[in-house]
Amino acid sequence: MTDKPGVVITGVSGRMGQMLVREVLVHDGLRLAGALERPGHDWVGHDLGEAMGGAALGVRVGDDPLEAFARAQAVIDFTAPAATVAFADLAAQARAVHVIGTTGLSDDDLKRIHIAARHAVIVRAGNMSLGVNLLTKVTEQVARALDADWDIEIVEAHHNRKVDAPSGTALMLGEAAAAGRGVSLAEVSDRGRDGMTGARDKGAIGFHAIRGGDIVGEHEVIFATGGERIVIKHIASDRALFARGALKAALWGQDKAPGEYDMLDVLGLN
Ligand SMILES: NC(=O)C1=CN([C@@H]2O[C@H](COP(=O)(O)OP(=O)(O)OC[C@H]3O[C@@H](n4cnc5c(N)ncnc54)[C@H](OP(=O)(O)O)[C@@H]3O)[C@@H](O)[C@H]2O)C=CC1
Ligand SMILES: O=C(O)C1=N[C@H](C(=O)O)C[C@H](O)C1
């Protein structure tokens, strides 16, 4: 059926890029409209299916985002901050829904994404899974119920290829805990202690990152006080759940007004 919204996948040779291809090919409501890699990448000009080591798909890997976005209704983007910011401008020009999974974005990057969202729908989340998004709601509620005698620490674990820390998910959970406590995360955040740090600051929200092997993604929020501890944990064991969340967002965004949205909007948890 050609009237299904067409999706372009950026960074298509990446861990998430390839997972997104597999998931969109079996999706009932979306079709694969294009695949992109950066200019000079080995896959550019080759059939996507063959580049992935399988049968030909009849989709050639391109390196021209504007040309690809013009033929699509959605762009799904799990790449790197510099690429994502450039894609946000181009997706907005093409009026395509831009689903952003990329993490490690700076405040300047977020400002540029915010500007692009004046003209198109952008759905951005550091984690596209239902479980983690639900966990942010739970974290916010628990933090609201407890006072600053309860120390909050967030521990995340990922594979050894991950380039940013804390993870986007850890930051989402930190924001949720700070919102529940009625404070600004920027003011209380304490990242990766080392050396003679002194005693813990009351009210701090601590972040710790483990990197090793092929860990897909694990996040723990610890609320600790004298004599007791509450630990809330999410374990992702399959990247397909992030890809499925992103495809859900691409479809959800089709009839929305331009603006910035997140997975809580898509999942109806807001
Ligand atoms: N929100 C969520 O639910 C999730 C988010 N992520 C995030 O998604 C991002 C990607 O993760 P992952 O797939 O593991 O990473 P990979 O490194 O496996 O893939 C990234 C892909 O993006 C490409 N890329 C990087 N820079 C550019 C550029 N300037 N132009 C075009 N393509 C570019 C890379 O190409 P090259 O190899 O040539 O550099 C690569 O193909 C990370 O930020 C990660 O944190 C991951 C999982 C879930
Ligand atoms: O880089 C990854 O792999 C992941 N990144 C996201 C993050 O930074 O939180 C989501 C997931 O945990 C996997």
Image (spheres, helix red, strand yellow):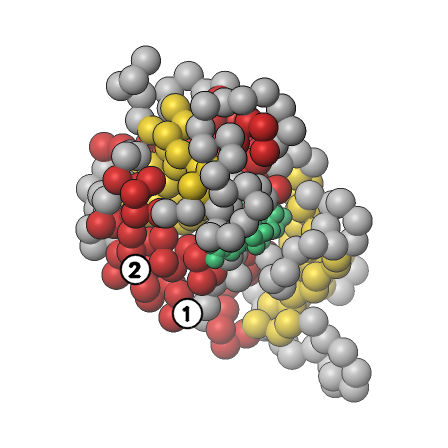
Instruction: Please give the name of the residue rendered at 29% of the width and 56% of the height, measured from the top-left corner.
Output: 89
What residue type is disc 2 on? His
Instruction: Give the x, y percent position of residue 180.
Output: 48, 58
Name the N-terminal-most of marks 1 and 2. Answer: 1
Q: Relative to 207, is 179 on the left or the right?
A: left
Crowding at mark 1 (Cα within 10 Å: few <14, some 14-19, many 20+): few
Q: Where is residue 90 drawn, in percent x and y?
A: 29, 52
Rendered-image quadrant of the C terminus: top left
Whether residue 82 is visible: yes
Measuring from the top left, give residue 170's x and y in whole percent.
59, 56
**Left or right placement of residue 185 versus residue 51 in this view:** left
- Residue marked by disc 2: 114
Q: Quadrant where the N terminus lies? A: top left
Q: Is residue 155 left or right of residue 48?
A: right
Q: Is residue 112 above or below residue 235?
A: below
**Which image quadrant for residue 114?**
bottom left
Label 1 amino acid?
Answer: Asp
Would residue 83 appear left or right of 195 to someone viewing this image? Answer: left
Residue beneath label 1, please?
Answer: 107
**Label 1 residue near ligand 1, CB within 8 Å:** no
How far apart, in angstroms, are the residues tagged by discs 1 and 2?
A: 10 Å
Ligand 1 within 8 Å, label 2 CB: no
10 Å crowding of disc 2: few (<14), some (14-19), many (20+): some
**Residue at (58, 28) in percent of width and height:** 50
